[in-house]
Image (cartoon, rainbow, N blue to C red):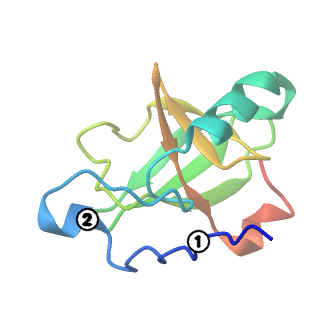
Amino acid sequence: MTRQPTRTPLHPVCAVEFGMECARAAEGHSLHPMRRRLAAATPSKWADAIVSSVSEDGWLELVSVETSSTVQVWHHHDLAEALSIGEPVALHAAYNVLAVGSEWFSVVVEPAAVEAAL
């Protein structure tokens, strides 16, 4: 019988806090290559939005271009340098990916907004 090695859990602290690249693949942290591929393979799940607010703690408010509904998303980095109010973005509803031009970010979507996702 073959024994599988036990996995060491990732440390819950994000490496970004120490000035390193984040190795966590959880939503809101680094974008896992599989989630990137899945988001790219399902173009019908993207929704266009406009940034209505950006905060230093990583929270963004987006307004849907199609429905005018708002959604809050979070990324572990302060995206204020990458985004400005009024900038167009796209949010992938199924895989929680935020596209800002050619850059893609993993985000956490506010739980209440998931049902009414852009």
> Residue drawn 82% across and 34% down?
45
Give the structural element (helix, strand or loop) at label 2.
helix
Which residue is pictured at 48% across the width and 77% down the height?
9
Q: Which mark is residue 15?
A: 2
The quarter holding residue 116 reads: bottom right
Could you tell me which secondary element the residue under label 1 belongs to?
A: loop
Q: Amino acid at mark 1?
A: Pro
Q: Quadrant of the N terminus?
A: bottom right
Residue situated in front as seen by the camera: 40 or 4: 4
Q: Picture coordinates of residue 39 (x, y %)? A: 72, 33
Residue type at tag 2: Ala
State the image quarter where residue 17 is shown. bottom left
Disc on res. 5? 1
Q: Nearer the viewer, residue 66 or 13?
A: 13
Q: Is residue 92 above or below residue 6?
A: above
Residues at marks 2 and 1, CA–CA distance in whole angstroms: 25 Å
Count neighbours of disc 2 (C-alpha within 10 A) and say few if under 14, some if 14 to 19, many if 20 or more. few
